[in-house]
Image (cartoon, rainbow, N blue to C red):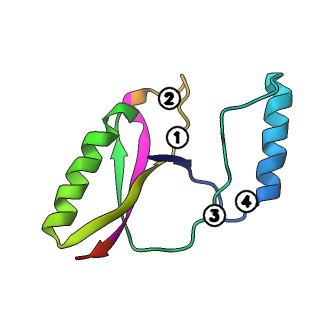
């Protein structure tokens, strides 16, 4: 499963790299967890906005897969979780907003 964060369309890889450099400086660390900048081209996908704890997204995705199968679609590749609110203490986990997305094709 990919974990993603939605950023504005105008965000460039150069901006991303500057932000990483600034974050390392502000946190006074040499290394950060693996983070990458990915641009995706448009594709047919199914998405669901889930409001609730991040730990429950797997169950929501399983429901999505069943509904997609019932409607004549199959999933392609791993799902992507797009976090609309950062995972920080100032946001209660049960109010987290996540878009669960997966590429699909007609059977």
> In the visual, does 86 lie left or right of 60?
right
Q: Which circle, 3 or 1, is nearer the viewer?
A: 3
Q: CA distance from mark 3 to mark 4?
A: 10 Å
Q: Which residue is mark 2?
A: 91
Q: Which residue is mark 1?
A: 85
Numbered circle sitting on residue 39: 3
> In the visual, does 55 lie left or right of 82?
left
Tell me if label 1 and label 2 are in contact, CB under 8 Å: yes
Q: Residue 24, percent across and down?
A: 81, 31
At label 2, counting other C-alpha atoms closer than 10 Å, the crowd grade (few under 14, some 14-19, many 20 or more) is: few
Residue at 56% in and 36% down: 86
At label 4, counting other C-alpha atoms closer than 10 Å, the crowd grade (few under 14, some 14-19, many 20 or more) is: few
At label 1, counting other C-alpha atoms closer than 10 Å, the crowd grade (few under 14, some 14-19, many 20 or more) is: some
Observer-nearest of 96 and 73: 73
Tell me if label 1 and label 4 are in contact, CB under 8 Å: no
Q: Which residues are magenta?
A: 94-104
**In the rendered structure, does residue 43 fall within the stretch colored magenta?**
no
Mark 1 or mark 4, earlier in chain: 4
Numbered circle sitting on residue 43: none
Circle 3: element type: loop
């Amino acid at each position: 499963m990919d974990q993603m964060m939605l950023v504005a369309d105008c965000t460039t890889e150069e901006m991303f790299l500057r932000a990483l450099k600034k974050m390392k400086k502000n946190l006074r660390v040499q290394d950060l967890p693996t983070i990458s900048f990915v641009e995706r081209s448009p594709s047919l996908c199914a998405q669901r906005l889930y409001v609730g704890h991040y730990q429950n997204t797997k169950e929501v995705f399983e429901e999505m897969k069943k509904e997609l199968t019932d409607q004549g679609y199959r999933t392609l590749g791993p799902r992507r979780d797009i976090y609309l609110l950062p995972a920080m203490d100032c946001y209660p986990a049960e109010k987290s907003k996540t878009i669960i997305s997966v590429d699909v094709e007609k059977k």
